[in-house]
Every structure is written in C-alpha cells, then in structure tokens.
Amino acid sequence: MSTLPEESSSGSKTIPTWDGTPEKYALFKAQFKALVTMNKANKIFNETEMNGLLKETAYERLAAGDQTKLTDGEKKAMKLYEDNAKMAAIFTLGQKTSAGAMVIAQTVTDEY
C-alpha cells in the first residue's frame, strides 16, 4: 500500500491497492471501506445519498458563492461531492492494473 498524508496526529493512512484479481478483491474492499470510514466519508456508500450527488457545475456554483449564505442542505451536498471526489481519487491511485481503472470509468461521467 502507498502512504497517504495524515491530517491528524495518529500517523499516516495508506492507500489500499488491488491488482485486479478476484481473489484479492475482498481484502481490497475491506481496506478501502476502512479508509472511507477513517475519512468520515461513509455516505458515499449510501445509494440514497448518492442519488442526490451534485453535478460538477452545481458544486462549482456553490463553491464560488458566499459560503456564509449556504443552507445546511447545500453544505451537506458539497461535503458529499468532496468526499466522493476524494475517495474516487484514492481508489484510482490504488489500482495496480487497468481493471480497477475500468471499474471507475464505468461509474463516472464528465459531470461527476
């Protein structure tokens, strides 16, 4: 696993890696879920929450506006977008073969 800079004082986190083989997927999945939990981004696994994921243009519009005027709902939507983007990047960095990259490619569009 690769080292990921830690934002707290507990040391460093690592990026789980996967070589694309079915027999190693279970360990990768468990490690990735643990990393998501450590990053307090569990809502990215909630289908209902993800159905409301902002598109990039909506996120950028909110991010460019006055942050003090955002509603709680808008703040939560922005956090979900940020968490999803961060975890997708970490997932992508952890791929040792094109198999994992193909998984990500099938789940994203230019707007997400």
Image: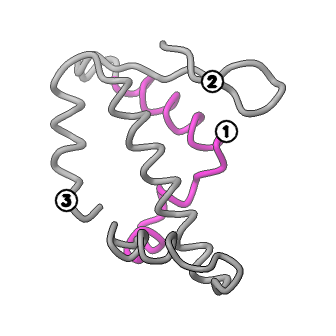
Query: Mark 1 or mark 3: which comes first in sequence?
Result: 1
- What residue is drawn where x is 56% and y is 15%? 3
On screen, residue 43 versus residue 89, left or right, reads right
Task: Report the quarter where the C terminus lies.
Answer: bottom left
Q: Which residue is labeled 1 in the image? A: 38
On screen, residue 51 versus residue 101, left or right, reads right
On screen, residue 93 versus residue 36, left or right, reads left
Q: Which amino acid, mark 1?
A: Met
Q: Which residue is labeled 2 in the image? A: 5
Q: Which amino acid, mark 2?
A: Pro
Magenta part of the chain: 25-52
Instruction: Please tell me which residue lies in front, 65 or 81.
Output: 65
- What residue is drawn where x is 84% and y is 26%? 9
Inter-mark Cα distance, 2 to 3: 28 Å
Q: Which residue is labeled 3 in the image? A: 110
Q: Which amino acid, mark 3?
A: Asp
Q: Secondary structure at mark 2?
A: loop
- What residue is drawn where x is 34% and y is 26%? 25
